[in-house]
Image (cartoon, rainbow, N blue to C red):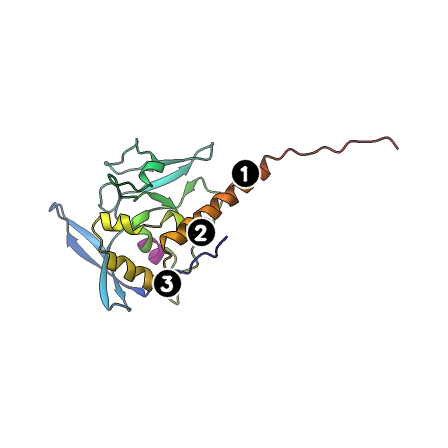
């Protein structure tokens, strides 16, 4: 399997928030202030925006079911219970957005026995990593291969939702994020590894024949 990429960040939290009025006029929305040393830009992150309503304060959780699949729970009033996860996570020309709830395998390394998975929205990856996994030296840990694959956003998706290609290329160059070709190779390796693990678990156990001495 290819080595998981090392994702870099030059963004540091300034430990303060700014209240920005909501577009619908219903109060303010807190934004955490960060500073990017590379571009010298001040960044404002909404406090973990909800993928259903784009607001703050909603809780969405992936929960493991007995059959190994996941169920999506949410207290958001816009939660669409009929969402088919595999379709929502796949790019198409008509529905280019692949922002879905994602389990954090870095969080899971601390507690692998929980049924309620630590969850964040795919488009909130940078916020989740900065808040939960930024080291005292302001570096991020190596990304597990499954997290690299599940959080990858293709150039065509970014272009379709209005992000200029130059911005995508600039971010990938600064952060070390892998291109789509590398993601496909990593995804195929993960599939082969999982297939091998499943096949090995289904191998029948051979019983030793007892012979008379």
Q: Can residue 190 be seen from the camera position used here? A: yes
Report the residue marked by disc 1.
198
**Most common SS among magenta residues:** helix
Q: What is the secondary structure assignment of the residue under circle 3? A: loop
Q: Can residue 105 be seen from the camera position used here? A: no
Residue located 39% across and 52% down the image: 181
**Viewer-side residue, 108 vs 181:** 181
Q: What is the secondary structure assignment of the residue under circle 2? A: helix
Q: Nearer the viewer, mark 3 or mark 1?
A: 1
Report the residue marked by disc 3.
8
Q: What is the secondary structure assignment of the residue under circle 1? A: helix
Label 2 to label 1, Cα distance in Å?
18 Å
Give the answer, above or below, for where 128 lies relative to 61.
Answer: below
Question: Which range of residues does the magenta coloring cover?
Answer: 127-131
Left or right: residue 44 versus residue 117 is: left
Magenta region includes residue 130: yes
Tell me which numbered mark, 3 or 1, is placed earlier along the sequence: 3
> Residue 111: x and y, percent?
47, 48
**Quadrant assignment for the C terminus:** top right
Residue located 70% across and 34% down the image: 206
> Residue 173: x and y, percent?
33, 63
Outermost residue, right direction? 213
CB under 8 Å between discs 2 and 1: no
Tell me which numbered mark, 2 or 1, is placed earlier along the sequence: 2
Report the residue marked by disc 2.
145
Give the answer, above or below, for where 46 lies relative to 14.
Answer: above
- Label 1 Cα neighbours within 10 Å, binned few <14 / some 14-19 / many ≥20: few
Residue located 62% across and 35% down the image: 203
């Amino acid at each position: 399997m290819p080595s998981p990429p090392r994702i870099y960040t030059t963004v540091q939290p300034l430990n303060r928030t700014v209240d920005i009025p909501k577009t619908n006029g219903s109060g303010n929305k807190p934004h955490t202030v960060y500073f990017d040393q590379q571009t010298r830009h001040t960044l404002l992150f909404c406090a973990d925006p909800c993928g259903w309503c784009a607001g703050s304060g909603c809780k969405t959780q992936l929960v493991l079911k007995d059959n190994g699949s996941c169920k999506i729970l949410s207290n958001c009033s816009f939660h669409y219970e009929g969402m088919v996860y595999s379709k929502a996570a796949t790019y198409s020309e008509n529905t280019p957005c692949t922002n879905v709830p994602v389990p954090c395998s870095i969080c899971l390394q601390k507690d692998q026995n929980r049924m309620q998975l630590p969850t964040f929205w795919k488009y909130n990856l940078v916020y989740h990593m900065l808040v939960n996994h930024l080291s005292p030296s302001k570096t991020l840990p190596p990304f597990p291969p499954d997290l690299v694959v599940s959080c990858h956003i293709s150039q065509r998706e970014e272009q379709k939702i209005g992000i200029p290609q130059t911005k995508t290329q600039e971010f990938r160059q600064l952060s070390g994020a892998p291109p789509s070709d590398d993601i496909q190779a990593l995804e195929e390796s993960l599939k082969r590894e999982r297939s091998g693990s499943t096949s090995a678990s289904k191998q029948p156990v051979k019983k030793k024949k007892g012979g008379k001495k």
